[in-house]
Amino acid sequence: MIVTLPVRVAAPALLALLVSSCSFAPRMSPPEQAAALPGTFDAASPADTTRAQSAWWASFNDATLDALVDSALIRNLDIRAAVARVTELQNQYRIARAPLMPAIQGTVDGAQSSAPSNTGSFGSIGNTIPGFPDRFENVTYSASLGFSYELDFWGRNRNAAGAALNEYFATRADAETARMGIVSETIATYYEIADLEDRIALSAGIVDLLDERTQLSESRYAGGLISSFELYAVRQNFDNEKAGYPTLEANLYEARGRLAILLGAYQAEAERWLGTDRGADLA
C-alpha cells in the first residue's frame, strides 16, 4: 500500500528531518593505527585476573604492606578528591543528557473556602429557612500533567552530552592513574623505610666496631706499635662512618613522613603501624 502525501505536508516534514540531523560540531578524524594488533591474545585464567590485577602487591606476601596499601586506598586525600571529581562529572553528564529526554511535569493543587451564610444575597434567605447552615464550605482539588520535548535541531544538546561523557571518561582514567600512583608510591616508600632501617642498624654496628678499633689503635700507638699515619686513617674511617649516621636517620624520618601523608594519618600513627605489630592496628 502506497500513501501519497501532499507537497505542502511532505515538504515541511522532510525539512524538519534534515535539519534535526544537522550539527555544527566539528568531526574529529580517527587517529592512525600505530601498529597492527595480533588477531588473538593469550587469555588468563579467571583466578589470575581477579586478585593479580586488583591487588598485585599481595604477591609479596607481606601482611604489613597489604594493610598499608589498603589504608592508603581508603584514607588518601588525593584518591578521595579524584573519586569526588569522578562523581561530580558523572552527575554533570546526567544533567547534560537531561534535555535529550522528554520532560514530564505533574502538579496537584487543593483549595478550601469557608464563608458565613448570613452575608451577601443569602443573608435574608437564611433567616427564613429552618436548618439553614451557618457557613458555606467548599473544597476543590485539581491535578494536571504536562509533557514537553525539545527538538535538538542543531545538535547542541547531543554535543553537550557527548562532551560531558568524554570528560567523565577522562577524569575516571585520571582517578585510576592517581590510584595506581598512590599504590606504587606507598609500596616504594615502605621498602625504602625497610632499607633505611637495615642500613641504620648496619651503620650503628660499623660505628661501634670502628670505635673499638680506634681505641685499640690509640693504645697501640701509645705503645709505639703503629705509626701516626695508621692511627689517623683509623680515626678518619670512624669519623666518616659516624658522620653519615645522622643523614640516614634524617632520610628515615623524611620517608616516614611521606608514608604518613600517603596514608592520610599523622606521622606518629604511621610509625606505630610500622612497629612490632606490623599494621595490626590498621582499620
Image (spheres, rainbow, N blue to C red):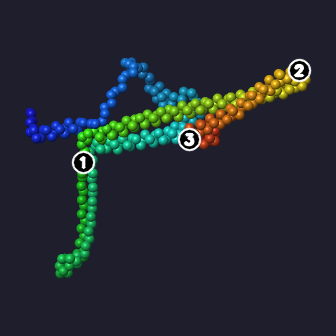
Q: Which mark is residue 148?
A: 1
Q: Is residue 151 left or right of residue 90?
A: left
Q: Which mark is residue 225?
A: 2
What is the secondary structure assignment of the residue under circle 1?
A: strand
The answer to the question of whether label 2 and label 3 lie on touching residues, with beta carbons closer than 8 A, is no
The answer to whether 60 is drawn above or below residue 149 in the figure is above
Mark found first going from the N terminus, 3 or 1: 1
Q: Identity of the amino acid at label 3?
A: Gly
Image location of residue 270, percent across then percent down = 61, 39
Q: Is residue 64 visible?
A: yes
Image location of residue 113, percent across then percent down = 26, 68
Q: Which mark is residue 264?
A: 3
Q: Quadrant of residue 98?
A: top left
- Which quadrant is home to the N terminus? top left
Q: As rendered, which of 140 and 220 lies closer to the eye?
A: 220
Q: Identity of the amino acid at label 1?
A: Ser
Q: Identity of the amino acid at label 2?
A: Leu
The CA distance from mark 3 to mark 1 is 49 Å
The answer to whether 71 is drawn above or below residue 32 in the figure is below
Residue drawn where x is 24% and y is 59% of the image? 142
Mark found first going from the N terminus, 2 or 1: 1
- Which quadrant is home to the C terminus? top right
What is the secondary structure assignment of the residue under circle 2?
A: loop
